[in-house]
Amino acid sequence: MKRRKFDLAATPGKAAVGVDDRFQVATPLRRLLNKVFPDHWSFLLGEIALFSFIVLLLTGVFLTFFYEPAMTEVVYDGSYAPLQGTPMSAAYASSLDLSFDVRGGLVMRQMHHWAALLFMAAIVVHMLRVFFTGAFRKPRETNWIIGSLLFWVGFLAGFTGYSLPDDGLSGTGLRIASAIMLSIPVIGSWLTSSIFGGEFPGTIIISRFFIAHVLLIPGLLLALISAHLGLVFKQKHTQWPGPGRTNGNVVGERMFPRYALKQGGFFMVVFGVIALLGGLFQINPIWLFGPYEAWVVSAASQPDWYVMFLDGSTRLMPAWQINIPIGDGYVIPPLFWPTVVLPGILVGLSTMYPFLEARHLKDRKSHNLLQRPRDVPARTAVGAMAVAFYIVLTLSGANDVIADKFQISLNAMTWAGRVGLLIAPPLAYYITYRLCLGLQQHDREVLAHGVETGIIRRLPDGRFVEVHQPLSAANGHADGHGELDYVGWVVPKKMNRLGALGPAVRGFFYPIEKPVEAPVSPGHPPVEPRGERAEIGSGETRH
Amino acid sequence: MSTHTEHQAPQGREPLDVNDPRLTRFDIVREGARRDDIEIVHYEPQVLPGTKAERRLTRVVAGFFLITGLAATAFLAIYIWWPWQYAPGRGGDKFYTPLLGATLGIALLAVGFGILTWGKKLLPKEVSIQDRHEGAVDADGRTITGQTMLYMADELGVKRRPLLGISLLAGLAPVAAVAAAPLVGGLISQPHKNNQMFTTGFATPEGGQRIRLVREDGRPVRPADISTGGQLTVFPGIEHGVSNRHADSPTLLIHLRDSDAQESRRANERVGHGDYMWGNYAAFSKICTHAGCPASLFEQQTNRLLCPCHQSQFLITDNARPVFGPASRRLPQLPIEVDSEGFFVAKSDYTETVGPDFWERP
């Protein structure tokens, strides 16, 4: 019998042919491998959110193996001595067990919490990047809307998540959430009673939050994130203006291998940072808060950072109650405005912004080139206004802590927040607008007259002038050189940017390669080539 | 291999024969890119093969990967052998979580930096340009798809046979309601069952005794138990009175100083609560009328009660009127007296709605 030769080296090739015979993937795969991505550090902010989400899924699945979503009353008998014998809900007891009686459970729980905080932070920073560079313009309005929804769905994920341990702090948050739902006119009491299965707190809310937190909300997040990435892929990434870059092309790197390698490395770095945070920095020490009891709360009860702006708006709201004298009388409590109406307005404004701006500017074109924030002063100033509004609210969410630490009257802090909320945004608008104009002007100035060299020259008549290095060649202009047009990209403003700095020599203790010849910088005469260096032997002279 | 080709329009270019044996592998890669409207305009190795720089970078990347291996092994060793069970005091177990996080973090960071160095420093740098093909709308495609859709509508003939469309809608609408019904019907819960939103644990049962005020441990309270200017959180002396099942019932029992008590009585009379206090003792709901947090910070000197959640402040001597912050309604007052055995009892339930406000509160 003839034995068939087994050629190991040819196996992958054969397998590939086999796969392609069946699925015809070679050409689509080539397109994927070849896809060009533009590169800039600011394009990586959204990735941090994506990678945090992956860490959230991984750690979250671990947590579900040990967490018990039940409000059944049990008596704690785990190893954390200070709480032994305390009656509490099974949810809180199992969260304590996760922290003390599951090996490595605490580091997973803390990583999960840190990843959630990072997820929301990355979303916000990414959103700011997209806003200030105009990346939301046509054709990317849909992706902007999906992104804004991701913030609010992430907000819900965070809130339902930190309610699950059922500790003293999260129970207080849940109590406030029930009051917020109660405050909605007409349907408030029905809504609250339906969600809590009766009067607060009831016995079912934790299991309902659990299924929302581990199935419904992550499912929605996953769907939205997939759509978000799919659209980025389909519509191709925006890019900064620059040499060779137009509205109709993408200048960058092909996805494989370098770009993909960098993404993979970056994922590991984000994962590593979350692991360090989860191990070294305590977050949400639920065992210090005790079980939730409706009559216990401590000062400095702050929610997670992304909820604090709503806490702040609630604190700043004046006690304006609207009474409707019909029948027995009806009430719209003051809580309704800062916690239901304000988020509603924020969702509406943020999702509609691309359309509002396009309508205002009568702009129907597609834009694939980004804008520098300074070049669109009105938008940048509106963004600064929103940021100022958000910061005042977030700080007000911690105004009791600020009042305590800095020995300020609590009432003064509240009033400062109320006044600040009205004054800070317009002020931010004005300052930002002026800053943008100033920066624009400086760009034009450098393009027209050149870079400051720091060289002061004395003229024959005794005047002192600073020598400027023009950026363009001489063409008989009044200054003796031509004027350049602004092209929407960074204008070099320091001599170093023009290559006036000496060549860098690579290596740590000793050069690892022959230094490159100094480039001929416009500011300096060409550097003389250095004389050959020879090793100095003992006692010998160079020849 | 360093290439710097002119960017050329891919249109009208003859595709290369990729089976030509004279082509290098890179030629085929570039041909593939061109077929995807990508021009590799700049492709330049960062380190030349066999140079000192290459060997050095290779060592750096390998070093990172070795650190990962070491840190991951350390993680496993710590995970298995380090004492992890919680023990009171300062034991080694307090370092368990930080050590796990540090070793895992170092392992992941090192592998990340290793991959990044590999990609950023060792791989050739390139600049590629891909056409977006966005401006050129496929007008024919639009027409064909549009006409196909219209043709499909024609085939269905809904326009000619409107009854089909109407009956389909009429049939599907209830189906949507059927899908929603179990969800809504199952979840919905009548908020005013047993008048629960307007009563608390202090409600006197039919023909029963008045409810005692008890402490957290269930013991009833005597007037002498609270010193002048002091306060105590009390609960209805019923089964599960001290639990979240009666989350609306926690009450603050305050022993006012003489002068404050007089002022307080006058304020009570103004709002028709003349007989709600017993001696210098007054009882107010602890559940903030704003968002339902326990208003638990009592400032003895000013007789103000502060809610730590949103800083609403209530002036106890003025019948717990909200004097600052977002709360708009007084804390309800519990009418109290002392029974024949000398313990505090509630004369009746709260006469106002306890807890955060809602639409139909009268």
Image (cartoon, coloured by chain):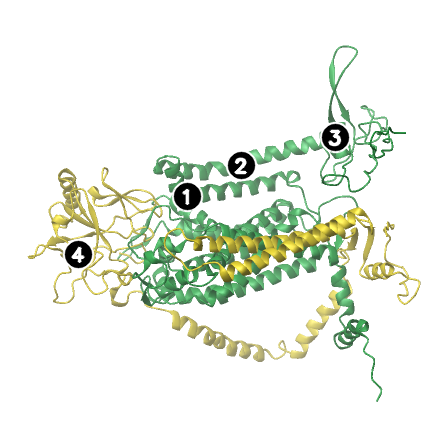
Chain colours: A green, B yellow
Q: Tell me the number on the disc at residue A495.
A: 3
Q: Chain of mark 2?
A: A
Q: Position of residue A477 (x, y in %)?
A: 83, 26
Residue furthest to the bottom:
A1
Point out the tag, 2 or 3, that comes first from the N-terminus. Answer: 2
Question: What's the residue type where badge 1 is placed?
Answer: Ala
Locate the C terminus of chain B and report the quarter of the image it occupies: bottom left
Question: What's the residue type where badge 4 is placed?
Answer: Leu
Which residue carries the number 4 mark?
B213
Question: Measured along the vertical axis of the image, is residue A504 above or below residue B87?
Answer: above
Q: Position of residue A422 (x, y in %)?
A: 45, 38
**Horizontally, is B49 left or right of B180 in the view?**
right
Which residue carries the number 2 mark?
A428
Of discs 1 and 2, which sits in the foreground?
Answer: 1
**Residue A36 visible in this rendered orientation of the protein:** no
Same-chain check, marks 4 and 2: no
Same-chain check, marks 3 and 4: no
Point out the tag, 3 or 1, that comes first from the N-terminus. Answer: 1
How many labels, in total? 4
Whole-number angstrom distance, CA of label 1 to CA of label 2: 21 Å
Q: Chain of mark 1?
A: A
Whole-number angstrom distance, CA of label 2 to CA of label 3: 32 Å
Whole-number angstrom distance, CA of label 3 to CA of label 4: 80 Å
**Pointers 4 and 2 in contact (C-beta within 8 Å):** no
- In terms of secondary structure, where does tag 3 sit? helix
Whole-number angstrom distance, CA of label 1 to CA of label 4: 35 Å
Q: Residue, x 63% and y 76% (percent of image)?
A: B159
Question: What's the residue type where badge 3 is placed?
Answer: Met
Which residue carries the number 1 mark?
A398
Q: Position of residue B65 (x, y in %)?
A: 66, 55
